[in-house]
Amino acid sequence: MMKNRKPAAVLLALSVLLSWNLSAEGQYEKEASHIKLATTTSTENSGLLAELLPVYQEDSGIIVDVIAVGTGKAIALGENGDVDVILVHARSREDAFVEGGYGVNRRDVMHNDFVLLGPSSDPAGIKGMNTAADALAAVAASESDFMSRGDDSGTHTKEKSLWKAAGLSPSGEWYKETGQGMGAVLTMTNEVQGYTMTDRGTWLAMKDKLDLEVLVEGDPILFNPYGVIAVNPELHSHTDYEGAMSFITFLTGPKGQAIIRDFKKNGEPLFYPDAMK
Amino acid sequence: MSKYAVTVRNLLYSYPGQKGSGPDEPAVNIKDLKLEQGKVTVFRGHNGSGKTTFLKILAGLIQPDQGEIVHTSDRKTVLVQQEPYLFHGSVSQNLVWPLKFSGIGIKNRESLVREKLRLVGLEGFEKRKARELSGGEKKRIAIARALMTEARTILLDEPDANVDSATTQELEKLIRTLSDQGMSIILCSHQKSFAYRCSDRIIDLFQGSPVSHDENIFKGQYRYSDGIYSDFAVGNHMIHCPGRQGEFSTIVIPPDNISVSREAEKGAIMGSGKENRLQGTILSVQAYKEGRFTVTVDCGLIMKVRMSSSLISMLNLRESDTVRLLFNPSSVRLY
Amino acid sequence: MTVLGEAVRLILSGDSELYAICLTSLKFSGTSILLASLAGIPLGFLLKLKDFPGRRFILVAVNSLMALPTVVVGLLVYSLLTRSGPLGSLGLLFTPAAVIIGQVVLVLPIVTSMVYGAVSDMDPRLPETLTTLGARKQHYYLMLIKEMKGPVLAAVLAGFGRVIGEVGVSMMLGGNIRWYTRTITTTISLQTSKGEFELGLALGIILMLIAFSLNFLIHMAARNE
């Protein structure tokens, strides 16, 4: 009775340690080589990476660990050398990243586009406008609720550039900086029946659940290019430059580009390959 | 080897926070005290008289401010608290812990546990959950646990508090048994009868200092006879005492109620035939207080008698004188 | 189908990724709380029972650190583990080790502080009993911990609740890498950001079930004591 009580805590501790050997299907393979990719949540959330990465792994034997964060943080992770390669969409900041010596070999990968969403009642009357800047000006004038990512992401950067193009710096109770991911912002916009700007991929993935409409699209300013950049191995010698380059080559090569082209949600393409133009 | 279990000299202790402030009123202040080995010593006193604190000092749980405590052997003392803390788990686990603490590998643990449980009258309690026992059972388990240590001096803090009378009697018996086995027992209590029945010696504590009453306490056999007076046998001596029904193990003869006469003045002794008469030699004459003296007489029993200085000089009492003692049976108290 | 119904269906379907995510969470939290307990329980006792230089400072630090949001702990440990940070050469960022380091930093103050509080409220008869029965050094402390199993377990449980439910540290230091450092909470966070509430809710239910069954087990164990 005394003998068997003592090891209860020890037993518990042991089971914790043993749990590390438990395998689940699709377990992380420690023996395989890994590269770390920092990318935006919108890329991850669209489901495109889930199509690309298994094919790449099959070809190269390299497993890509995806760290999905906002564009701002993805770039910061690259600057600090915490990842090997980044896949982001904020052209001006990508250029600054390369110019700062943090990244090398930037390549265009693909683009999608942004759209302006709003309720079908459209209180600001922007439906069918051809210029995104004019549409935003109308939203501001009517002081209709506008949900902004407000999180320094690529989407947020793009949104700010649109306001700038409209000659406005939005403020007021109607302009809400949520600080959340795209999916969460769309859900919030739906709840308040307001306006927002989103990438088309997230919109297509979620539109069945949303009582919102695409009101403005097609303006060239809404074009959203994705670039892939290897972290500079001269600055961070520990990074897997070869792995990063092999991934970039795959992504911008025929196989990767074909997967991007054929990736569809509800029959509609989400991304348009750009690398082989 | 000394015949004292504990010797205390110049012991002084004040509670933290009271030190150095105002007139010094130490919680414990003992100039010189010797406690006999193999005896039961009872400290009696009101709440706050310093009883528990003194026991804790003896147990080494409290460091005195100054003074010296000498234990006879390095097998020190063990304290049993008023409401003892029993460990989680079974009774036998509780009893085995002291063995583990001392690091002595003892093979026959089970039989040792059984023996101690039998001693405290709780045979077969090994598997019981210690913390679910009654208050009196807990006390006895705590004593059994204390007996598992190497200590030959056991300190009991108010063992008679908060237990029913049956348990009190069990505890009395247990304490006497342990004493007969040669254990030194020091306990405190504020119940008169419990104190008398258990003890070989009573020391009253008043504001942290011992006050001796030089009471004559004797253990023996009570023989009830159906009259006004009965007899109480202490060894070969037969003491007449009040006739009361019940079981009594102890008589107390107050030293103030004994009269003394010179052997020569036989005629001076008057009274009924049932008076207690003893004859013996004076061992010492010592000042008590307020002009009174304590005379110790060896009559086969060691008797202490208290009398005024004027009476002593009138009778011209000195050491080695032979005297007669006389006291009324009704002054003898039964416990 | 409602979101809740879909969540229950997901749990019952025995989805292997769901299972892997839960296992990862348990591994991380279990290891973190194990390490934090190994350090925090003795520290809690020492802080109360021993006087040593720096004791007061540690007490203040422990109590202040309890209030830190998980994201701040994540940031602090990130700044140490990043390749540009002092411990960057270890290459720990975005590995399970990083998450566990962060979670230990997060929960060590909680375990320590709760154990310290429990020791402060300890029955004063316990140390007296141990001393008088001759318990020395390792026996003495072993018995203190043994006798205070209840409150110590409560401290460990509170700590476990904190780590299994935290998202800041896991997200920041683990990177939410699929099959590797993706835990229950980072998945909930990811799914919510995608607007897919079903899996998030399913995991939320599992999280509650884990917490409930653990508390229940401990409660039963305490009753059998």
Image: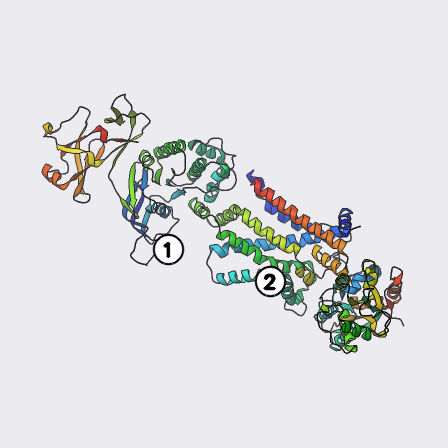
Considering the image in quadrants, where does the N terminus of chain A appear? top right
Residue B16: numbered disc: 1
Considering the image in quadrants, where does the C terminus of chain A appear? bottom right
Specify the color scheme: rainbow
A53, A204: nearer the viewer:
A204
Q: Secondary structure at mark 1?
A: loop
Left or right position of A258 against C116: right
Where does the image place residue B308, in percent across and percent down from the top left? 15, 40
Chain under numbered label 2:
C
Q: How many marks?
A: 2
The residue type indicated by label 1 comes to Pro
Q: Is residue C177 visible?
A: no
Q: Which residue was labeled with disc 2?
A: C68
- Relative to B203, say whether B278 is above or below: above
> Looking at the image, which residue sits at the far top?
B226
Q: Tell me if mark 1 has few (under 14), some (14-19) or many (20+) residues whose alpha carbon lies within 10 angstroms of its own.
A: few
B150, B230: nearer the viewer:
B230
Mark 2 vs mark 1: tell me if same chain.
no
B302, B164: nearer the viewer:
B164
Q: Is residue C165 visible?
A: yes
Question: Residues under labels 2 and 1: Cα distance?
Answer: 38 Å
Chain under numbered label 1:
B
The residue type indicated by label 2 comes to Leu
Q: Which of the 4 quarters of the picture holds residue B141? A: top left
